[in-house]
């Protein structure tokens, strides 16, 4: 079955990229294999684990459940885009300080979901945090420190805004 | 049994005089976390090499079938397809994988691709290598296979019946191995017991499901004739014989590398089959070959735990003292014994659990079935064994009208008997277990909950409280497999480390382990910092394992919670030796008697004349470049290599041996509530006490405790494999294999005790598998909730339907499931 | 893990999409993709072409018209879940959305995609039937028709939409009178799972406390949403208390023959259906009487 390659333009972490892709290419494969953003991870094949979560046009989405062609013209943030000029984002800092990761495989996805949560709810309760990451499986931490880290980051981010 | 003999204790005792205790115990920010929070880890699938190709598999839809015909012609002719192999192609290129079992199981023919027949659903039947992941998957769908389905055997007990279908005809039986251990005068105690309590328990089938699946990149460099295998195997050196034989390449030409690994939990021990296939393909194509397992392949065909069914009997005195235990167990090990039946001996690490049980008899059968091969999943073999012990303790308590906490307190080995020798020759290094139980009960408000339980029950609410103790035996003695296969030349448990001070005074550390998130770079750096008293930030630990630079033995790797007791001990030794060398050089350079040199705060100085001091980095510069300043005859450089060898021995003629180096201890107290109308369980409170010896980094230890609890809760309430009677796996995806999310795992309260191990120089003990205590604790709590209705839980898994059936049955007068 | 090849179209107008649908054989409409792409990745489905509706802005909206709430088929779950209007007027729908999938799914999945897919275990179909929703089907050339929720779901993964001709473009929620309330309940092992059993109840209660109208609809127990008519009959005109709710639940689930699968047996589904129906009735009643937030 012949397919035409589509020419797409995607903005990732503030920079525009162009690529020629098959319509069936998954966004996660575009990000990882074509554009080199290997911080986006693949953990399953049914859209459950959330390791591939990125921010697309302001919303957290599973990049394995989006076609690359659907991202044509979109703005995407991956974990690699969280730090600015070598400074970690408060969420990254909080994850490190609170050891909210062990093997690190689910971590980029957790950070993206946390980022989305805090973008609309700057002061979430523990229940809201757990709900916000229900689409991000972790096998190492039991989620305890992840919840702790997101709370800590929320506190830091809202206090620095106030200050 | 009793306190261990002094001559054994002195054999095991380690010197820790090089520690300064300035860096151990501190919650330093883990080194690994910095790159991982930035998405800059290097997992196998992140590796991109020029001209890389991609591998995919066709897998058997049948659990048991003869392969009549495979037609790969359509796949082969697709553009972008480079290679299509079946079992016959593999058979031409390698001998069958060596088996670690005794005869006749040793005759089992095992290839990485099925040859002549398939033995479990999901077994790889053909492999494709293509220019892209997409083409490889397309090509797999173009391969035609004619199967002749055969009757499947899916029940381990029925697999032993005469006339049962044979998984391996060449073996002639489905029995992999049978062992019978008897320590102490078991028969006497059973004859003289006040009562005998018996029950049948089943430890169900599940897996570890790390978020990163099995993956490998094999890269054959034709110019150097070197095969590099980037993998995520937990013990790459253990499989070196298979790799070397399969590829017909000597060890010095085989470079096996691990970098970041996204979790293991035991499932990444037997993925060497993919390493071999990728390497064979790479050698053929002279291009790198990458394989990344899909989640469905992982759940269906990577590694399951060994299901175990046991009939347990306890000989008990009426005051609650448990005198002896008998267990007759059958292990369902799946279709190939690629790591099993090691589980038939590994439980003996904790043979009588935490108790003063005097005699033990174990009659174990390991069996082939048409299911995914079993391997060591977190808590391997100790967890099911301790499950049986803890469950029978609860039953005994109930029979005698004792509280489950009381009966444990009555039977626990006391601190005055430490180090304790078990009837099977195990040596528990240290611990004050009764005190640990007391503290855990207090922290959990156990007696408060018992009171509340009564009140709430009167209101019609179904509340259960479980208290369970566990041992996390760690740092295995591989000689345990000699207990069923005396001819196996694989014994002891060792690890290596290299500590080097580089010419600029920084420190470089290379480990033998293959960590999957346990923070080895962090804890190794802390131990080195502590011994040398240099800054943690000046210590650089190489990520992962590399057989071209790591100091390794064939035990090297990360499994069985071995890094803290064995790996860190090697790091300590190497750092201590380096410290000695630095002191010698400093003594000469400072013109100071050797015994007077103190290494402290990144410098060496004369204790009696503190003005005479030199920074370590100046010494390092001299050691490498200004060598004429060194004492005559002294070797330059600041390299230090050590391989730590615990004083393990082989099992004696009665098969008694110490099978693990350290024994962490934990107590879990769980409160659950059951919805009386739906049977849905909910954890109201979770408290854990952990004593894993000296804590190197509390962040790391707590993380491991949380993770072990999460796995236990998952296994008890959410994760269970379901096979139908034809061997079809009904839940091979994350749709129906229920890995819990943050909404299912409860919050946890963790408290600590630190009883250093005398058997490791750091005092640290291995931990992280938790001994499966969480599974025991949740099941114990659920059974406690159902007990007033006469309900009993015989399995390590309690789903709402099972619970509701018990509730309804109790209402009707039937109570056991 | 990766789908078979397909042709791909991303029309920017509804008319173009409908035209492509009727012209391209073997084509499927792509909405949020959270169900369709999952099936394609596992190669359980291999449509020859996908018509992506995501660039058709005219299909994303929530608006009021004569007391009705009109929702464009391509409106994502999250927008609906966050809508204060829906939360206030149709609490059963709000709850069903809150408990649907996870945040990432709610950021892509659409109401139209869910209803057109008609998964017997999906959260929304029973709610639509309980609310007496209307689905608007469109065909190329401007044709439109309204299909009542009761008729929309025909069988497992099968709706009343004419295959390859019609697309769902709008969902219309009728106003329910003063004294109305609803509830949605779901039982599953994990929160993100499809339900083992789910119930949507919507009712209107008179000032005297008697039920004037009630709709009790189960999901995951049959190939399509199951109207527990027996329950509705018991509720008619009655004042609801624990005992009556239990009787209604018993009557409404008596004839159920739910499926067995790896998560639950038929027996368990039937048991729990009764429990959930009872609880949902009590909750809906309390809300209808203004006794609950």
Image (spheres, coloured by chain):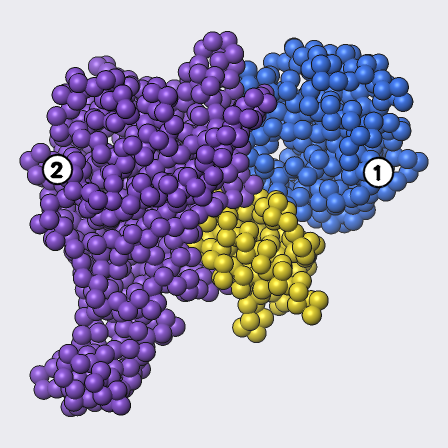
Chain colours: A yellow, B purple, C blue
Q: Is residue A67 above or below residue B123?
A: below
Along the viewing direction, whichever of B276 and B547 lies nearer the viewer: B547
Residue B525 image position (x, y, % from top left): 33, 66
C184 shown above or below C275? below
Instruction: Left or right? Give the position of B489 relative to B727.
Output: left
Both labels 1 and 2 in a single chain: no
Q: Residue furthest right?
A: C66
The circle drawn on residue C70 is: 1
Q: Residue at point 60% right, 28% down? A: C187
What residue is shown with label 2? B656
Indicate left or right for C77 with B178 as reference.
right
Q: Is residue B132 above or below residue B177?
A: below
Give the SS element for disc 2. loop
B286 shown above or below B610: above
- Closer mark to the observer between disc 1 and disc 2: 2
Residue at figure coordinates x 24%, y 84% from the top left: B605
Along the viewing direction, whichever of A159 and B394 lies nearer the viewer: B394
Which subunit holds the residue at mark 1? C
Q: Chain of mark 2?
A: B
> In the visual, does C91 lie left or right of B559?
right
Q: Quadrant of residue A162?
A: bottom right
- At label 2, counting other C-alpha atoms closer than 10 Å, the crowd grade (few under 14, some 14-19, many 20 or more) is many
Report how far apart the C-alphas of labels 1 and 2 lie in the structure: 76 Å
Residue B815 picture location, percent across and down: 44, 14
Residue positioned 22% across, 40% down in the render: B349
Question: Is residue A100 shown left or right of residue B333?
Answer: right
Q: In the rendered image, is residue B529 in sight?
A: yes
């Amino acid at each position: 079955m012949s397919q035409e390659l589509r020419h797409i333009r995607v903005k990732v972490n503030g920079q525009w990229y162009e690529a020629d892709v098959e319509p069936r290419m998954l966004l996660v494969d575009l990000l990882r294999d074509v554009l080199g953003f290997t911080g986006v991870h693949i953990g399953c094949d049914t859209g459950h684990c959330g390791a591939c979560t990125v921010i697309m046009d302001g919303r957290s989405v599973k990049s394995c459940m989006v076609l690359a062609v659907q991202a044509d013209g979109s703005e995407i943030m991956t974990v690699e885009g969280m730090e600015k000029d070598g400074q970690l984002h408060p969420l990254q800092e909080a994850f490190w300080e609170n050891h909210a990761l062990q093997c690190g495989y689910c971590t980029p996805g957790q950070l993206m979901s946390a980022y989305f949560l805090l973008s609309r709810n700057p002061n979430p309760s523990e229940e809201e945090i757990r709900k916000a990451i229900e689409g991000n499986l972790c096998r190492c931490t039991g989620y305890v420190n992840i919840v702790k880290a997101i709370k800590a980051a929320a506190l830091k981010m809202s206090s620095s805004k106030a200050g | 049994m009793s306190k261990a003999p002094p001559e054994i204790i002195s054999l095991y005792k380690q010197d820790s005089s090089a520690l300064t205790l300035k860096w151990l115990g501190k919650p330093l920010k883990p080194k690994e976390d910095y790159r991982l929070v930035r998405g800059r880890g290097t997992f196998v699938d992140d590796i991109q090499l020029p001209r890389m190709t991609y591998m995919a598999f066709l897998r058997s839809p049948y659990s048991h079938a003869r392969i009549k015909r495979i037609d790969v012609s359509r796949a082969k002719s697709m553009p972008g397809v480079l290679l299509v192999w079946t079992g016959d192609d593999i058979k031409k290129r390698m001998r069958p994988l060596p088996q670690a079992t005794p005869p006749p199981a040793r005759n089992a023919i095992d290839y990485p691709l099925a040859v002549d027949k398939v033995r479990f659903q999901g077994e790889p039947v053909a492999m494709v290598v293509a220019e892209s992941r997409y083409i490889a998957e397309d090509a797999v769908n173009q391969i035609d296979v004619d199967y002749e389905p055969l009757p499947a055997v899916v029940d381990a007990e029925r697999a032993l019946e005469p006339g049962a279908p044979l998984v391996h005809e060449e073996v002639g039986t489905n029995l992999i191995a049978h062992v019978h251990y008897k320590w102490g005068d078991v028969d006497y105690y059973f004859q003289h017991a006040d009562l005998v309590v018996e029950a049948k328990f089943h430890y169900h089938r599940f897996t570890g499901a790390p978020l990163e699946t099995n993956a490998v990149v094999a890269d054959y460099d034709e110019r150097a004739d070197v095969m590099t295998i980037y993998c995520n195997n937990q013990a790459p050196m253990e499989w070196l014989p298979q790799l070397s034989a399969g590829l017909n390449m000597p060890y010095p030409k085989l470079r096996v590398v691990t970098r970041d690994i996204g979790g293991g939990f035991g499932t990444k021990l037997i993925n060497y089959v993919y390493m071999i296939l990728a390497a064979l393909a790479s050698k053929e194509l002279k291009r790198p070959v990458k394989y990344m397992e899909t989640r469905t392949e992982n759940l269906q065909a990577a590694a399951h735990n060994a299901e175990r069914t046991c009939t347990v009997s306890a000989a008990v005195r009426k005051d609650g003292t448990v005198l002896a235990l008998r267990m007759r167990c059958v292990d369902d090990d799946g279709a190939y014994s690629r790591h099993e039946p090691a589980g038939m001996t590994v439980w003996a690490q904790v043979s009588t659990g935490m108790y003063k049980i005097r005699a033990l008899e174990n009659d174990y059968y390991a069996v082939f079935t048409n299911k995914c091969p079993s391997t060591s999943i977190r808590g391997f073999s100790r967890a099911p064994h301790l499950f049986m012990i803890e469950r029978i303790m609860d039953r005994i308590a109930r029979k005698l009208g004792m509280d489950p906490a009381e009966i444990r307190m009555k039977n626990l080995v006391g601190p005055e008997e430490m180090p304790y020798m078990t009837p099977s020759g195990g040596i528990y290094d240290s611990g004050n277990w009764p005190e640990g139980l007391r503290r855990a009960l207090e922290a959990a408000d156990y007696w408060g909950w018992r009171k509340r339980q009564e009140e709430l029950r009167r209101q019609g609410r179904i509340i259960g409280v479980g208290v369970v103790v566990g041992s996390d035996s760690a740092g295995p003695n591989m000689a345990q497999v000699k207990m069923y296969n005396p001819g196996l030349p694989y014994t002891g448990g060792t690890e290596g480390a290299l500590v080097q001070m580089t010419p600029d005074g920084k420190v470089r550390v290379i480990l033998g382990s293959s960590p999957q998130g346990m923070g080895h770079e962090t804890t190794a750096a802390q131990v080195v910092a502590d011994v040398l008293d240099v800054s943690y930030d000046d210590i650089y630990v190489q990520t992962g394992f590399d057989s071209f630079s790591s100091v390794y033995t064939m035990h090297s790797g990360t499994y069985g919670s071995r890094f803290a007791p064995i790996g860190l001990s090697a790091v300590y030794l190497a750092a201590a030796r380096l410290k000695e060398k630095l002191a010698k050089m400093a003594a000469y350079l400072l013109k100071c008697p050797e015994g007077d040199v103190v290494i402290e705060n990144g410098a060496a100085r004369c204790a009696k004349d503190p003005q005479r001091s030199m920074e370590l980095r100046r010494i390092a510069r001299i050691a490498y470049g200004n060598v004429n300043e060194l004492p005559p005859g002294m070797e330059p450089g600041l390299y230090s290599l050590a391989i730590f060898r615990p004083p393990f021995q082989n099992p004696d003629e009665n098969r008694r041996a110490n099978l693990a180096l350290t024994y962490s201890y934990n107590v879990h107290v769980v409160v659950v509530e059951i919805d009386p109308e739906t049977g849905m369980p909910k954890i109201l409170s979770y408290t854990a006490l952990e004593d894993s010896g000296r804590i190197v980094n509390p962040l790391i230890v707590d993380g491991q405790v949380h993770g072990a609890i999460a796995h236990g809760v998952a296994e008890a309430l959410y994760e269970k494999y379901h096979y139908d009677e034809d061997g079809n796996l009904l839940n091979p995806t994350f749709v129906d294999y229920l890995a819990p999310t943050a909404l299912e795992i409860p919050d946890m309260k963790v408290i600590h005790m630190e009883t250093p191990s005398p058997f490791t120089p750091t005092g640290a003990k291995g931990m992280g598998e938790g001994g499966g205590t969480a599974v025991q604790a949740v099941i114990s709590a659920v059974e406690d909730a159902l007990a007033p209705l006469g309900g009993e839980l015989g399995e390590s898994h309690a789903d709402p339907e099972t619970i509701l059936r018990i509730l309804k049955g109790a209402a009707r007068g039937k109570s056991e499931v | 893990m990766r789908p078979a090849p397909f042709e791909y179209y991303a029309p920017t107008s509804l008319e173009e999409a409908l035209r492509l649908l009727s012209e391209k054989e073997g084509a499927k409409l792509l909405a949020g993709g959270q169900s369709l792409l999952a099936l394609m990745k596992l190669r359980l489905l291999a449509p020859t072409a996908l018509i992506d509706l995501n660039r058709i802005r005219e299909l994303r909206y929530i608006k009021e018209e004569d007391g009705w709430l009109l929702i464009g088929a391509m409106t994502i779950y999250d927008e609906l879940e966050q809508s204060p209007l829906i939360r206030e007027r149709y609490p059963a729908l709000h709850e069903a959305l809150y408990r649907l999938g996870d945040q990432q799914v709610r950021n892509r999945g659409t109401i139209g995609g869910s209803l057109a897919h008609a998964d017997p275990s999906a959260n929304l179909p029973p709610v639509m039937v309980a609310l007496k929703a209307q689905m608007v089907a469109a065909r190329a050339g401007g044709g439109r028709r309204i299909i009542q929720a009761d008729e929309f779901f025909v069988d497992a993964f099968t709706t009343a939409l004419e295959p390859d001709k019609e697309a769902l473009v709008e969902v219309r929620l009728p106003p329910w009178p003063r004294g109305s309330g609803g509830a949605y309940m779901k039982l599953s092992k994990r929160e993100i799972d499809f339900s083992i059993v789910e119930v949507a109840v919507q009712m209107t209660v008179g000032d005297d406390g008697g039920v004037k109208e009630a709709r009790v609809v189960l999901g995951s127990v049959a190939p399509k949403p199951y109207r527990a008519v027996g329950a509705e009959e018991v509720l008619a005109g009655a004042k609801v208390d624990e005992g009556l709710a239990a009787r209604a639940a018993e009557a409404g689930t008596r004839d159920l023959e739910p499926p067995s699968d790896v998560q639950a047996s038929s027996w368990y589904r039937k048991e729990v259906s009764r429990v959930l129906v009872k609880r949902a009735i009590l909750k809906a009643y309390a809300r209808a009487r203004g006794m609950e937030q």
